[in-house]
Amino acid sequence: MEVDGEKSDVEREEEDDESVTDVLKDRFRLSAIPIAEEEAKRNGMEISAPIVACIVDLAFKYAENLAKDLELFAQHAGRKSVNTEDVILSAHRNEHLAATLRSFCEELKAKEPQSERKRKKGSKKDDKATTSVVDISDL
């Protein structure tokens, strides 16, 4: 809503969000197009530009939905930031992917120096949430 030719704070914020999304989408596209083309080439296939654009758009929408899910998982656990348990939980419908993510996280933890692993002790609520998130195979 414009008042005396000026845009409201809400309108400016919406425009900023749209421009940030557009920049992210463009950068995602620039990164994903060569990957799709290389995979097609590696598999001995040809891929047309409209198909590549469709794949890139689908992948971007998937990434947006994944980001929203991860944010909701963290909020539900009472946290402000996403952690590895949230990522593993997001893959609960694909057991192979969940298992791969779990082993990847374990490898990262094993490589992490012991001093960096120690953090401030969180509340018992956080400890319980972490334990229940890791056991997603029961879902």
Image (spheres, helix red, strand yellow):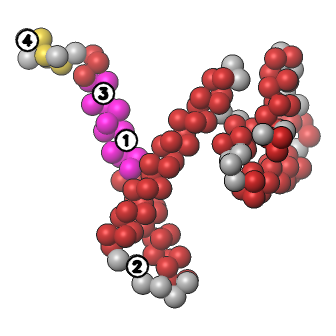
Q: Are marks 3 and 1 in contact (CB under 8 Å)?
A: no
Q: CA distance from mark 2 to mark 4?
A: 52 Å
Q: Nearer the viewer, mark 2 or mark 4?
A: 2
Regarding mark 2 in the picture, which secondary structure is present there? loop
Q: In the image, what residue occupies the spot 40% across and 79% down? A: 47
Spatial separation of the CA atoms under disc 1 and disc 4 = 28 Å
Name the amino acid, label 4: Asp
- The residue lying at 61 percent from left, 36 percent from top is 70
Q: Quadrant of residue 46?
A: bottom left
- Furthest toward the left, the residue is 4
Of the two numbered discs 2 and 4 on the same chain, state the one appearing first in sequence: 4
The tag earlier along the polypeptide, 3 or 4, is 4
The residue at 12%/11% (across/down) is 3
Residue 68 picture location, percent across and down: 53, 35
4 over 72 or under it: above or below? above
Residue 91 left/right relative to 9: right
Q: State the image coordinates of residue 23 (x, y, percent, origin top left).
A: 35, 46
Q: Does residue 112 appear in this view? A: no
Task: Tell me the SS state at disc 4.
Answer: loop
For the C terminus, the quadrant is top right
Identity of the residue furthest to the right in this view: 114
Say whether residue 132 is left or right of residue 59: right
* SS category of the residue bearing label 1: helix
The residue tagged 4 is: 4
Mark 2 or mark 1, earlier in chain: 1
How far apart marks 3 and 4 lie (CA) works out to: 19 Å
Chain part drawn in magenta: 12-25
Residue 100 visible at all? yes
Q: Are marks 1 and 4 in contact (CB under 8 Å)?
A: no
Q: Which mark is residue 14?
A: 3
Which residue position is annotated with label 1? Answer: 21
